[in-house]
Amino acid sequence: MKKNEILLPTVHLNGTSKDELVNGLRAITAGLDEALRAIQDAWPHGRDYYTQSTDLHAVHAQWAKRRADLHRIRAEFHYMALQTHYPEYDFDLDEVE
């Protein structure tokens, strides 16, 4: 998703507070960090696939794609948290970690 496609919440008197919005987005980011660590810990090993005649490179490629997708989603939520907390700045989605 491109930066200009990400819809950000508007902080105003009748809406959810800025702190609640940012804390919720940070909680999502932290949960995705945990998921990324879990993926790394559960990374596939050849001993679990050799009986299937499965190409381990293909297995790793699938896992790497899933990990990359989570990294992208995590970056989007982190960008949303930063941009909501500091609306006066124009953060670059590609530089958000």
Image (cartoon, grey):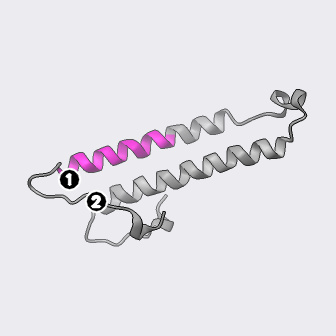
Are dots 1 and 2 in contact, CB under 8 Å? Answer: yes
Q: Which secondary structure is most common in the magenta stretch? A: helix
The answer to whether residue 26 is above or below residue 79 is above
Find disc 2 in the rendering and name its residue: 84
Q: Is residue 97 left or right of residue 53?
A: left
Q: CA–CA distance between discs 1 and 2?
A: 7 Å
- In terms of sequence position, does the residue under pointer 1 or pointer 2 come before the other? 1
Q: Tag 1: Cα neighbours inside 10 Å, few (<14), some, or many (≥20)? A: some
Magenta-colored span: 17-33
The answer to whether residue 41 is above or below residue 78 is above
Q: Which residue appears at 9% of the width and 52% of the height?
A: 14
Q: Which residue appears at 33% of the width and 61% of the height?
A: 7
Expressed as whole percent of the image width and height from the top left, the position of residue 39 reads 62, 38
Q: Which residue appears at 51% of the width and 38% of the height?
A: 34
SS class, disc 2 = helix
Q: Is residue 46 left or right of residue 64?
A: right
SS class, disc 1 = helix
What number is the disc on residue 63?
none
Find disc 1 in the rendering and name its residue: 18
Q: Nearer the viewer, residue 42 or 8?
A: 8
Q: Is residue 81 left or right of residue 15?
A: right
Q: Nearer the viewer, residue 48 or 26?
A: 48
Q: Nearer the viewer, residue 37 or 1?
A: 1
Amino acid type indicated by mark 2: Thr
Amino acid type indicated by mark 1: Lys
Expressed as whole percent of the image width and height from the top left, the position of residue 35 reads 53, 38
